[in-house]
Image (spheres, rainbow, N blue to C red):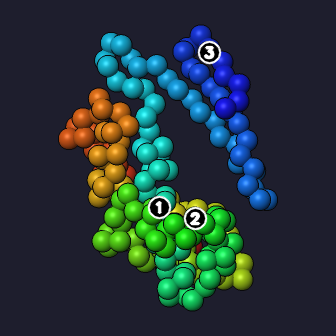
Amino acid sequence: MGPAAKTEFGVFWSCHDIRHNKYDTRHLYILFHVSRAKGECLMIIPCEVAVKSIIPAVKALMAKELVEEHGLTQNEVAEILGISQSAVSKYSHKVRGYVVRIDSVDEVQPLINDMINLLMGETHQRSEFLELFCETCIAIRKTNLMCKFCQKSEPTIEVQECGFCGSLQSRPKRR
């Protein structure tokens, strides 16, 4: 990991580069102190949990569909999704991306199909794809499939009292 520092607010930060092929991804990790008065962690946010559970599940479904329904090779799928061929292989063999079973969520498959159609088209707007991806994540989170992972990452969360993900509203479409 890169440099780390402590601020007067108790925030530690660390930043490092991960360079993979043509991509340059920068990550910033921010760790917040536990509130001693309430016993709550201040910054375990659902999106952080989704990164390790929902996003791989969505990518796994997309990879599966591109290989099985569109007849693409793992290398072609890797190129389209911006991931490695080995990641596609792991998705195909259910080694990765199956922590959360999302294929039974009714709203997911049409959104997956829309994302694939965008990616398979000649041109697509990145913002349109991102909106669909976020809408997919919201649809999954509204089912409370992610609650147990939030609680594992922060045991003080009372799942019955949280209700955050269940109250999310889909964004209106700009189309």
Q: Is residue 57 left or right of residue 104?
A: right
Q: Residue furthest toward the left?
A: 160
Asked if residue 139 shows in the view, the reply is: no
Vertical comparison of 120 with 1: above or below: below
Vertical side of 102 occupied by 150: above or below: above
Q: What is the three-letter code of the residue carrying label 1? A: Arg
Q: Residues within 10 Å of mark 1 (few under 14, many from 20)?
A: some
Q: Which residue has dot 1 on it? A: 96
Label 3, on which residue?
6
In space, the residues marked 1 and 2 are separated at their CA atoms by 8 Å
The percent position of residue 165, horizontal first and vertical second, equals 34, 49
Give residue 30's quadrant in the image. top right
Do the CB atoms of the residues marked 1 and 2 lie less than 8 Å apart? yes
Quadrant in the picture for the N terminus = top right
Disc nearer the start of the sequence (1/3): 3
Query: Badge 2 is on which residue?
Result: 87
Q: Position of residue 173 (x, y in %)?
A: 51, 67
| Kind of element beneath mark 2 | helix
